Amino acid sequence: MKPDFSLLLVLLTGLTGLVWMLDSLFLRRRRMDRAVQKSTERPRDPVIIEYSRSLFPVLLIVLLFRSFLFEPFKIPSGSMIPTLLVGDFIVVNKYAYGLRLPVLHSKVVPIGEPERGDVVVFRYPVDPKVNFIKRLVGLPGDTVTYRDKKLYVNGELVQADVRGHYSTSEVKCATPRPDAIKLTESLGPVMHDILIHEGSSDRDGQWEVPEGHYFVMGDNRDRSNDSREWGFVPEENLMGRAIGIWLNFDYTKGCGDLSRIGDRIR
């Protein structure tokens, strides 16, 4: 079972904070009083108190930063190629869609709303312990249609211009995909590249997005496990919006592409 890092971080922060508080309010004074009564030098603090005093502020800063501001994620699969590659390390804006309590995931401060075309990180509805990243295609109330490898939103065809075959020569460490065709798609105000694969079976369908839910798809349209397979993403599962790449290194190939550092995600 994959450990819940957020829960672990909350528990460690709470434990070290509790030890530090008890020591500051009660235990340190008792140690000092005993030392005065015995006319001895100031006793050394117990190891657990020293560690708690040192770790608590660090853990608290990390908890607040990754819960309410920004959190790093690693891309493990190719479902978002060519926008995101295997081995990309990305930064996610955690306050883009409102501030949520860690572990409980309940929204406490509403700030913004998801927009069509956003690249979003969310907890997989089938297994909330797993994080997914996809592009938001359908908003609540939208009708999303996918037919003959073409995307329609509310009956209107989403413009996608063919750019030619996807060349991995332009992407270091990428796996060759000679059957992939790259297109530039205009999804609302967002223009981004997608891939379709020749000979792949179409996953046609039409979906009505219910209130409080979103429809998501991978940019690698024929190689993505997304809303076409398992349905909609509840609003409470959204974790944030992907905004940039801070590193690229594919451990399976032992290869990285430093040119991707600093790229914005759109």
Image (cartoon, rainbow, N blue to C red):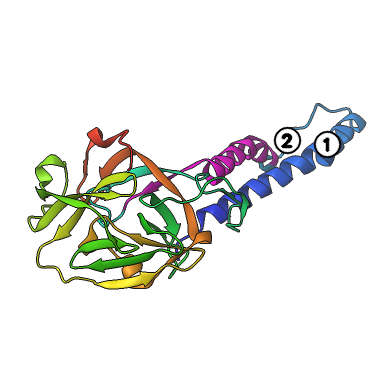
User: Which quadrant does the C terminus fall into?
Assistant: top left
Amino acid at the residue labelled 2? Asp
Cα distance, mark 2 to mark 1? Answer: 9 Å
User: In the rendered image, which quarter is residue 197 located in?
Assistant: bottom left
Q: Residue at x 84, y 28 (%)?
A: 40
Depth check, front residue: 240 or 174: 240
Q: Residue furthest front?
A: 155
165 is higher (above) or lower (below) than 226: above
User: Which quadrant does the N terminus fall into?
Assistant: bottom left
Give the image location of residue 5, x and y in percent: 51, 53
Give the image location of residue 161, x and y in percent: 16, 50
Q: Which mark is residue 31?
A: 1
| Start-end of magenta stretch | 49-75
Q: Residue at x 33, y 42 (%)?
A: 265
Give the image location of residue 152, x and y in percent: 28, 62
Q: 115 left or right of 165?
A: right
Q: Earlier in the sequence, mark 2 or mark 1?
A: 1
122 is higher (above) or lower (below) than 148: above
Q: Residue at x 40, y 48 (%)?
A: 73
Give the image location of residue 183, x and y in percent: 17, 51
User: In the rendered image, which quarter is residue 215 located in?
Assistant: bottom left
Q: 148 left or right of 10?
A: left
Amino acid at the residue labelled 1? Arg
233 is higher (above) or lower (below) than 74: below
Asked whether disc 2 touches disc 1, contact meaning CB atoms under 8 Å apart, the reply is yes
Q: Secondary structure at mark 1?
A: helix
Q: Residue at x 50, y 45 (%)?
A: 94
User: Which residue is tagged 2?
Assistant: 45
Q: Is residue 186 magenta?
A: no
Instruction: Classify mark 2: residues with Cα within 10 Å, few (<14), some (14-19) or many (20+).
Output: few
